[in-house]
Amino acid sequence: MLRNWSHLLVLATLLPIQVQAQDDDYPPVLQAVPLPKDVDLRVDGQLDEAIWSSAPASVAFLQQEPHEGAAPSEQTQVQVAYSKDHLYIGAMLYDSDPEGIIGYQKRRDASLSTDDRFMLILDTHNDGRSAYFFEVNPAGLMGDGLLTTGQGINLNKDWDGIWDVKVARGNYGWSAEIRIPFRTLNFDAKRDTWGINFHRTIRRRNEELVWSGHRRNQGLFRPQNAGQLIGLSGMSQGLGLEVRPFAVGTSQRIWTDGVGNTSRQGDAGFDVTYSIASNLRASVSINTEFAETEVDRRRVNLTRFPLRFPEQRAFFLEGSSVFRFAPSSGVDPYFSRRIGLEDGQVVPIRAGARLAGQVSRYDVGFLQIRTGATGNLPMEDFTVARTKAHILSESSIGFLYTRRSTHGGDELGLQNRHTVGIDLELATSSFRSNKNLQFQAFLIAHNAARINATSSLFDRTVRGIRLAYPNRPFYMHASYREFGSAYDPAVGFTSRTGFRRFQPSFSYSWLLSEHPVLREFTIELRHEFLTDLDFKAETVNTSISQELRLDSGDELELSIGHDFERLVFDFDIRRDGSVIVPTGSYHTWEIEFEGETAPQRRVSVGGGIGYAGFWTGTRTDFSLSATVRPGPGISVSTWWSHNDVRLGSGSFKTNLVRTSTSLALSPSTAFSANVQYDDLSRIVGLYGRFHWVIRPGSDFYLVYTHNLMDDPLNRLVPITSQVATKLAYTHRF
């Protein structure tokens, strides 16, 4: 029962409330109301301005969990207004138990698996293919990202748009007032209708409410299931010009034989973005700098193949969804970390230009980068071009081209390296009335990197197909792909070559909505059959896993599998020659158990234990994690991973420890730090970052890194340290 009668009265008398029920054929519609001229809303989280008493509101939310299609336990009301320059969204999130509202997180883009939350997407092209994502919690956290669909769903939360939100709490529950500048969005100015959807989580009940598309195979992250926002007109992006100058200062110290040498450097640059059209943007970056980028999370690699780390640099994240190629198929003909990074060494980016957006029914993207010479690395030019045509209602066909040119490459025996790729995606969300079905095919080829290379074109190609039935409760997929033995795209990433692989998987999930303790039980069967190009088996894996999710949010998982591996070369597992796995064929079994408590608890823990046959012996692995949340904006997490490997050629143990601390005084001020150590590299890494959002789009960063080596005498010997400051200011015209 609502405790604040004034809000109850407002809810009962609000001018026209849209309560249209969700329907698979007729999604809900929400009317956007224009603000009177020269009137701008003061964003404070209180929906007490006159426009909110007259704007149509919708309360047409339904449960997605735990009772699919049931009425919500608490009411949620959404409204939309707009001016020439801004879109405003007002949300009243009523709660009969305001003391039960959970809001731990304040740091931007922190995971809200711990908190109550309100999320929305804006499909500004109203084509059901991509959307902008925004989220907020009762503590005022801002989260955003770029959402794209295809063979799966990809939410890129590393994108940071310029927008603002304020929240308020009371005995009615909580409320949010969101302001999004139209200059932040790409859209077709001629459209008066956008796709829109809302999602609310009531965390103490793990109740998920959706405005449109409440079925388990639908939801917020599928723009094709969104409702409609109507009544838009006269939106402006101003001149469409955005200038972001920045200044960077660094002080670096490098130790050699115990002697430290310090160097200091100041630098500056700027980014300029111009909206050629309301849905097409061009950007130029001069002297691009990434001093604020967070460090990668360290991992112990006991496989034969390189690890892939995600991109975290803002310049490459902006518009990155346009460049995605054959999502879910495990191919990366374009991988942006090949630009400006070489074997972990930072390579300066002197200038870059980017074009991204939509022209008619085509997604287009273009990237041109020049890196500077550093050390033994010469200057290089990188080109990436991408276009994707929308066909049918949910399908597409695309083309990708990359080029890498090394200055003075002739002297190094290198020629310009070109890669081309074609990907096809056929998809529908109306198979058998309301089921999803997806098919994907791709082909990639590149020329030889070296002038006198002898590999054939077939050896430098990859090709594959994938069929998916991504639904709940039943899910299945099957994929087949071939990677040539000389495949190595110059601006891409691949971990393994020279194989043919067939990989199916099946899963079924029972939603136990009536059970007092259990929420969901899932069983999954996965198989991988990988051969060399002569069809001789190299890797064959079969596993079955069972996952149990409790109504509280606690989770348990048990998996059992059988593995076959054929080594054609000796494997130096520690990369130091101390333990060698000889060539041969290996059959092994493995079992693993994992569990974690619900993340919304003030203290949450997790862990796992596994035992497996491992090459010529065994491997036992443990992992433990714990997070403490003393109060809003404060969290301390520790994670430990241990491997005990016993092989015929030798035994060893590995340990990886990581501790992270986050202190967010407000949604605009945050300090984060982490310490990492593994006993393979024997390096202790310390990282700290202070981030102050002066105003949306203008930021100050103070970043400190320090690496130390654990020497044979168990002493911590310094290797490098650096202090960096960065000030960036965004001005829009």
Image (tube, grey):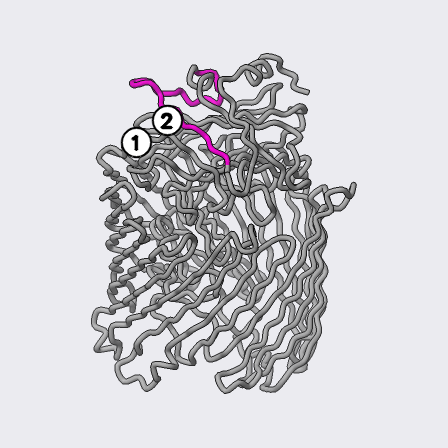
* Mark 1 touches mark 2? (CB < 8 Å): yes
To which quarter of the image does residue 383 belong?
bottom left
- Residue nearer the viewer, 599 or 663: 599
> Residue 105: percent from the left, percent from the top?
56, 36
587 left or right of 390?
right
Q: In terms of depth relative to the viewer, which is nearer, 730 or 378?
A: 730
- The secondary element bearing badge 1 is classed as loop
Depicted 150 relative to depicted 49: above or below: below
Rendered position, 31 above or below 550: above
The circle drawn on residue 332 is none
Q: Residue visible at 31% across and 29% down?
A: 85
Quadrant of res 513: top right
Q: Give the residues drawn in magenta, as a range.
A: 28-49
Residue 652 point in image, percent of width and height:
64, 72
Q: Which residue is drawn at 29% across and 37% down?
A: 189
Which circle marks residue 235 in the picture? 1
* Residue type, numbered disc 1: Met
